Amino acid sequence: MSRRKNSPNRKNHKKKRIVPEYEGTVLMTREGFAFVRIEGQEEDVYVKANKTRGALHGDRVRVAVTQEKGGLAKRRSGEIITILERSQRPFVGILHIVGKQAWVLMSSKTMPYDIEVPVPEGGQRGMKVAAVVDDWERGANCPRGHVVDVLGMPGENETEMHAILAEFGLPYRFEKSVENAADKIPDTISDKDRKGRKDFRQVLTFTIDPTDAKDFDDALSFRKLENGNYEVGVHIADVTYYVQPGTEVDKEAQVRGTSVYLVDRTVPMLPEKLSNKLCSLRPGEEKLCFSAVFEITPQAKVLNPWFGRTEIVSDYRFDYEGAQAIIDAGAEAMKQEFGDGTECGRVPDSVKEAVLILNGLALKLRKRRFDNGAVNFERPEMKVDIDENGKPVGVHQKFFREANWLIEEFMLLANRSVAEFVATGGKMGGKALSKAKTFVYRIHDEPNLEKLSGLRDFAGHFGYKVGSIENGKEIARTLNNLMVEAKDKPELGAIQILALRSMAKACYSTDNIGHYGLAFRFYTHFTSPIRRYPDMMVHRLLAQYLGGGDSASLDYYTLQCKHASEREVVAAEAERESTKYKLVEFMQDKLGQEFDGHISGVTEWGIYVEIEPTKIEGMVPYRTIRSDFFAFDEDHYRAVGRRTHRSLRLGDAVRIRVKGTSLEQKLLDYELVEDLPEMDKADSDEQVKRRKR
């Protein structure tokens, strides 16, 4: 008998499929399944609960993509191979103690498991605590960790705000050593401090800020020139003169990256000695600044920018309402007194005239910016009103008018001019140097064309004819025209949401690609060093280059830009969470009440509705809708009833009833108010029961 040769069986042999692997960050859900976010990729990887290998929210992992779906689902799924790094961000829960054992009981949207911990010192049963996971041994029922902070009793305002900060790994106090280091910085300005500075103390200077502002990091100076032009100075607190690199205060500011603005408080990047006193441009006090000074024609043409260190005295402190009163009065402003908006009583005619001239210049700069392709749309910004105990008592919309735009346009002018100066080697109006010196830019990429195409299709359902989306400038013009056309229409909010989703996120980078949303080739952040560390980096780099210094380390600043961008995102998330908490708290006594609203989101599990006039968002699960079974139609941003074929579309007007509130999860449940015939009510009640079962 002859032997067969050991050769592959061609019929049965299958080529082994290569499974792509990536590194990413886990986004865990309450139900235990997760998504892995991979840097540089838009689509996350879905991971079933039994494929997570003990990974938790925030962990750095390696994930294998085992399946990719096209069509409407457009989802890729996979499994976590290994945990590369455990997150050090705490989880917040309720401490439960039994004898000598303790657990942190979770009710978080991102943590489905309780954490076993040693009994913490000072911790009592029922208190809210923050705990970090150390490990999760195979076979153990839950992860093990330790308590890093005892926050207090649930429901108390201090406890809940500290809990939000702890959940995002944000500090709510300074270490004593940092405070002591700040306290040692001299309060007085010496002749040595003034050396090499331009003296603007005799030039009319003022600040315009919100009424409740405590730190004033920017001021405007104004004077007329003999040639008919104006000199406008943008003066920024010289924080980096006081905070030297490598000092304890600097290291802490670098780690924080930014100030954080919760509903009821500011968590500053710098200790109060600096943020509210030494570096705050308070009226009547001599202050050291880093300035951008411009000659500007009456037509708002910018000439001869100058950058350098200065000394100023702010003559007036306006709030936005006071400055707006002067603008509204216009030419009549010279005949009226405006004491309410300043701390200095009667405002002289020369100051009123300066405000009016600056406003005229700002409006011209603003128009030119939009003519050049800046995107001009904003979602309504809502502000929660709270009492002295932190309890929410109202919600109102913040309106932005000429006084806000006045400050905005001159801050934008300073920011883009500083960036252009460095990028072009001082040749303003020229091209960027091929080997420009290392710098920190604020960049914003062009929109996602696929998402813009979806927006065009969606707007088409309402009868809007959306123009070209082929190039950057045309996209901006198209979007601006669409917003104007949809103004005051029910679908405006939905169109704004989809337009915002199509936009890239702005971030910090040493690689300048320009700022699409503002239509600037060069842009940076120079104007807020009290509250943003990137502005401090910009001040140091600009000072170095003005002094003829060599280019700074590209690798170092690239890493710093990445860190600053990450801290900005974390701060924004914490701010949103504090607002959500207060909005849910505000709605707690409104159970059963009905409101008109618009559909603000459509998902696989339900619709989201923003109610009027507060824009407070809650969810209506499909399973609670009595009239029909609804299925998600992702391509058309709608849910469709299987029996009635009724569509619930993004932007549709609906009426809802407040069904439930969850402060712990910061969620609101709404239900649709439906006009059902009597015969259908019994059937629909039975449908709801079956779906719940």
Image (spheres, rainbow, N blue to C red):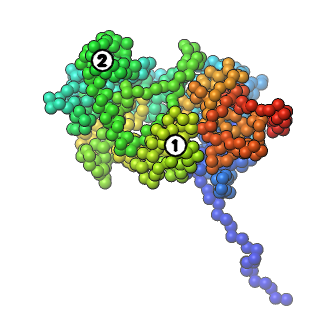
Q: Residues within 10 Å of mark 1 (few under 14, many from 20)?
A: many
Where does the image place residue 647, in percent across and percent down from the top left?
68, 42
Q: Are marks 1 and 2 in contact (CB under 8 Å)?
A: no
> Which part of the image, by quadrant, shows the N terminus?
bottom right
Check disc 2 and report the residue beneath it.
Answer: 333
- Mark 2 surroundings: few (<14), some (14-19) or many (≥20) residues within 10 A: some
> Is residue 216 shown left or right of residue 621?
left
In the rendered view, does 533 fall on the left or right side of 678? left
Decide which of 679, 357 is in the foreground and name it: 679
Q: Amino acid at mark 1?
A: Ala
Res. 281 in view:
no
Q: Quadrant of residue 680?
A: top right
Q: Which kind of residue does numbered mark 2 sit on? A: Ala
| Alpha carbon distance from label 1 to label 2 | 40 Å
Residue at the spot x=55%, y=47% of the render? 460
Judged from the image, the secondary structure of the residue bearing numbered disc 1 is: helix
In which quadrant of the rendered image does the C terminus lie? Answer: top right
Residue at 55 percent across and 43 percent down: it is: 498
Viewer-proximal residue among 247 and 275: 275
The location of residue 466, given as percent across then percent down, is 49, 48
Q: Nearer the viewer, mark 1 or mark 2?
A: 2
Residue underneath mark 1? 499
Between 310 and 634, the one nearer to me in the picture: 634
| Residue occupying the point 70% across, 20% down | 124
Expressed as whole percent of the image width and height from the top left, the position of residue 257 reads: 46, 34
Q: Residue at x 68, y 24 (%)?
A: 594
Compared to residue 500, the image places residue 667 above or below, namely: above
Location of residue 420 with respect to 170 vertically, above or below:
below
